[in-house]
Amino acid sequence: MTTHSAHTVASSPAAQAANTFAAAAGTAGAPAAPRPSVIQLAIKEKAALYAAYIPLFKEGGVFIPTTREYRLGDDVYVLLSLPDDPQRYPVAGKVAWITPARASGSRSQGVGVRFPDDEKSHVLKLKIEEILGPQLASDRPTQTL
């Protein structure tokens, strides 16, 4: 089995010219922007939606249990399914909350993803709040606050 190094030497004149151009443009060695991770989150019960929803984010958001490491501000693409709704809602959000492993209060490890400030997310926030109704005012603990 052959392994390849991350650093390769340009051997052809065309490859050398491309590297020279990249260096002149200031892009040689610059890390590519990481692709956002894609997470499918199917919430099947109203109680689980209550525990996952983050109403304190102005645009709304959801908590996603995960052991994957994220940093605040990381881009995350979520395909969200809500209780009794066959539609999947795509959300291009950002990590705005992190619950580490072994957090207090028996909270699950994971991240809170803030919805973007756009019309689709506004409609999704209203849909979630419609499903939850009076439960939004509950004192029951959630996965975040």
Image (spheres, grey):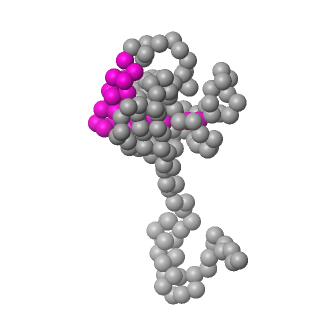
| Residue 101: quarter of image | top right
Q: How far from the left and from the top, in percent, is residue 93?
A: 43, 40
| Majority secondary structure in the magenta region | helix
* Residue 19 visible (yes or no): yes
| Residue 120: quarter of image | top left
Q: How far from the left and from the top, in percent, is residue 96?
A: 51, 34
Image quadrant holding the N terminus, namely bottom right
First to last magenta residue range: 110-133
Name the residue located 46 percent from the left edge and 38 percent from the top edge: 42
Q: In this view, does 134 lie to the left or right of 68?
A: left
All told, the count of numbered labels is 0
Closer to us: 132 or 67 = 132
Whether residue 25 is situated above or below residue 20 in the rendered picture: above
Whether residue 13 is situated above or below residue 38 in the rendered picture: below
Closer to us: 40 or 63 = 40
Name the residue located 43 percent from the left edge and 43 percent from the top edge: 79
